Image (spheres, grey):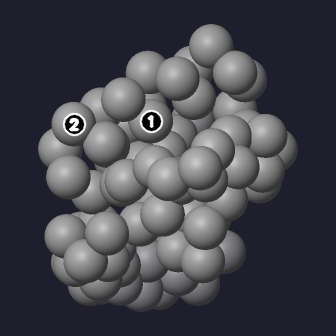
Amino acid sequence: MARRNDLDICAEILQVARAGAKKTQIVYQANLNFKIVEKYLKRLTDGGLLQSKDRYFFTTRKGTTFLEQYRELLDPIAEFEVSKKVMFA
């Protein structure tokens, strides 16, 4: 499995928090540790992509827009990777 970059991690956190999630849920579902998740939660909250309420984190409208654009960006790349594997198999 390839290493994840910051955008991948941010997208995973936003995906987990779409319906609301506690920090523990985010840690386990995004496969992170508590120390690292703190950094990302602050970054996403400060950027307006995530909001917290009563120990739950929720993806904001801005966060949902980010997720949609992130997926649109990755779709052609994923298709290229699949075709490259088929060509060189």
Which amino acid is tagged 1? Leu
Which residue is located at x 17 percent, y 44 percent?
47
For residue 79, above or below residue 22: below
Which residue is label 2 attached to?
A: 46
Q: Position of residue 5 (x, y in %)?
A: 42, 38
Q: Which residue is nearer to you in this view: 51 or 77?
A: 51
Question: Helix, strand, or loop for circle 2?
Answer: helix
In the picture shown, does residue 16 fall above or below 74? above
| Percent coordinates x, y for residue 85 in the rendering | 57, 74
The answer to whether residue 19 is visible is: yes
**Residue 35 place in picture, x, y as percent:** 62, 13
Residue at image location 21% in from the left, 36% down from the top: 46
Q: Nearer the viewer, residue 2 or 85?
A: 2
Q: Is residue 4 left or right of residue 25?
A: left
Q: Quadrant of residue 74?
A: bottom left
Q: Report if the CB atoms under discs 2 and 1 are less than 8 Å apart.
A: no
Q: Amino acid at mark 2?
A: Asp
Q: Which residue is mark 1?
A: 41
**Earlier sequence position, callout 2 versus callout 1:** 1
* Residue at image location 66% in from the left, 74% down from the top: 89
